[in-house]
């Protein structure tokens, strides 16, 4: 009797594990598909011309961007990784690429630009980045290059890294931390990069 109960429990645990693996596999596949579609869309609107100096940021028409719009490509040369940039940081946007935090700026506005993404999808290998590495933000009107100068680890609830009133251009990129944590991570890994 006891051995039958143990066999039944073992079988149920194996079935539960298999169902969980199928679910996780489907989620990863679905996320990759959404990201690929957004990346294709983003590639049709971006310019690879490097912008070094801006005389009139008003021509970039940032005011017309709405939540959910595909606005560009975030390229990480060290990882040779292109990720679509989506306006907004809800779960829907983050499941399709890197989210641009709505109340922060865009390249050329001399404000903080905040991009966020999931550590287990778009920001895999994010911990391999070092000070001095480049980050490229490719938009319709050109490509902006930033250099990583610093990083910090903060509590997941710490919003002090968001400063929409900042008067100096800085690209701030955040993701969950630790990178190998399973479930909702307790911290955020935040990179600060400045125009090169």
Image: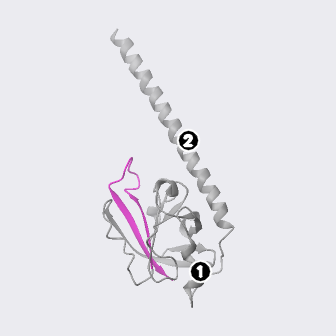
Q: Residue at x 41, y 70 (%)?
A: 191
Image coordinates of residue 27 in percent, x first then y, are 53, 44
Give the mark toward the camera: 2 or 1.
1
| Furthest residue in direction bottom, as rendered | 55
Image coordinates of residue 97 in percent, x first then y, are 54, 59
> Does 2 appear above or below 88?
above
Q: Is residue 69 magenta?
A: no
Mark number displayed over residue 194: none
- What residue is pinned by disc 1? 60
Q: Give the magenta part as a residue range.
A: 170-196
- What residue is pinned by disc 2? 26
Answer left or right for 186 relative to 117.
left
Q: CA distance from mark 2 to mark 1?
A: 38 Å
Task: Tell me which numbered mark, 2 or 1, is placed earlier along the sequence.
Answer: 2
Colouring:
one colour
Helix, strand or loop at mark 1: helix
Callout 2–callout 1 Cβ contact below 8 Å: no
Q: Main secondary structure of the magenta part?
A: strand
Answer left or right for 50 relative to 191.
right
**Total label count?**
2
Image coordinates of residue 1 in percent, x first then y, are 34, 8
Image coordinates of residue 41 in percent, x first then y, are 66, 62
Q: Nearer the viewer, residue 97 or 59?
A: 59
| Furthest residue in direction right, as rendered | 44
Q: Is residue 195 magenta?
A: yes
Answer left or right for 154 relative to 104.
left
Helix, strand or loop at mark 2: helix
Crowding near the residue tagged with mark 2, few <14, some 14–19, many ≥20 C-alpha atoms within 10 Å: few
């Amino acid at each position: 009797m006891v051995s039958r109960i143990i066999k039944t429990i073992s079988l149920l645990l194996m079935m539960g594990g298999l169902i969980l693996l199928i679910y996780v596999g489907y989620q990863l596949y679905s996320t990759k598909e959404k990201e690929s579609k957004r990346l294709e869309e983003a590639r049709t609107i971006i310019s690879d011309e490097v912008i070094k100096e801006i005389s009139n940021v008003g021509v970039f028409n940032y005011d017309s961007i709405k939540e959910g719009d595909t606005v560009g490509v975030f390229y990480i040369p060290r990882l040779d990784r292109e990720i679509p940039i989506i306006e907004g940081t809800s779960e829907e946007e983050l499941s399709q690429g890197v989210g641009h935090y709505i109340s922060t700026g865009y390249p050329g506005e001399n404000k903080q630009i905040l991009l966020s993404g999931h550590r287990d999808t778009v920001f895999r290998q994010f911990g391999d980045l070092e000070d001095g590495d480049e980050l490229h933000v490719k938009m319709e009107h050109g490509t902006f290059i930033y250099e990583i100068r610093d990083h910090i680890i903060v509590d997941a609830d710490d919003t002090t890294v968001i400063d929409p009133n900042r008067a100096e251009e800085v690209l701030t990129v955040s993701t969950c931390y630790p990178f190998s944590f399973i479930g909702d991570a307790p911290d955020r890994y935040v990179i600060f990069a400045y125009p090169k």
